[in-house]
Image: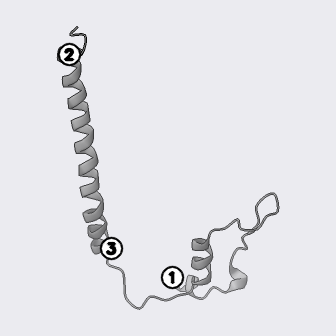
Amino acid sequence: MSTSDKNSTKEDRIAVDETTPDGASGGLDTAWNFLDQHRDADTSEPIDIRALRRKIDWHIVPLMFLCYTLQFLDKVILNVRGCSPHRHPTTGG
């Protein structure tokens, strides 16, 4: 965060209309309101981007591996089923 961002005041911020086009309130979600209220919060420790990326990767890569494995198995099973001669169990044909 630059020094100009830290020194900004509420007057310097862009006003966001919190109403929907039909006039109903609640156009913004709670996450936006929280971030807007805590915009000037100062973190005392720097964020290690490499550690954050590593942590995210350890959660996402196994899920991706599982999805790709299931997709591969589905493709192989359908291919084998399509190539094999199959008979209807009751009619025999």
* Mark 1, residue position: 2
Report, in whole angstroms, how far the alpha carbon at label 3 lies from the one at label 1: 18 Å
- Sequence order check, earlier mark of 3 and 2: 3
| Residue 86 % position (x, y) | 20, 16
The residue mark sitting in front, 3 or 1, is: 3
Please tell me whether mark 3 sits on a helix, a strand or a loop: helix
Q: Tell me whether circle 3 and circle 2 mark residues in contact (CB < 8 Å).
A: no
Please tell me whether mark 2 sits on a helix, a strand or a loop: loop
State the residue in front, 68 or 42.
Answer: 68
**Residue at the farthest bottom position:** 44
Mark 2 residue crowding within 10 angstroms, few (<14) / some (14–19) / many (20+): few
Report, in whole angstroms, how far the alpha carbon at label 3 lies from the one at label 2: 55 Å
| Residue 39 % position (x, y) | 57, 82
Q: Give the residue displayed 25% in from the left and 31% down from the top.
A: 75
* Mark 3, residue position: 49
Looking at the rendered structure, which numbered label has been put on residue 54? Answer: none
**Residue at the farthest right position:** 23
Q: Give the residue displayed 67% in from the left and 87% down from the top.
A: 9
Dividing the picture into quadrants, the one containing residue 72 is: top left
Looking at the rendered structure, which numbered label has been put on residue 86? Answer: 2
Instruction: Tell me which amino acid carries mark 1.
Output: Ser
State the residue in front, 66 or 56.
Answer: 66
Q: Give the residue displayed 28% in from the left and 63% down from the top.
A: 59
Dividing the picture into quadrants, the one containing residue 60 is: bottom left
Looking at the picture, the colour scheme in use is one colour
State the residue in front, 17 or 31.
Answer: 31
Instruction: Tell me which amino acid carries mark 2.
Output: His
| Residue 73 % position (x, y) | 21, 37
Mark 3 residue crowding within 10 angstroms, few (<14) / some (14–19) / many (20+): few
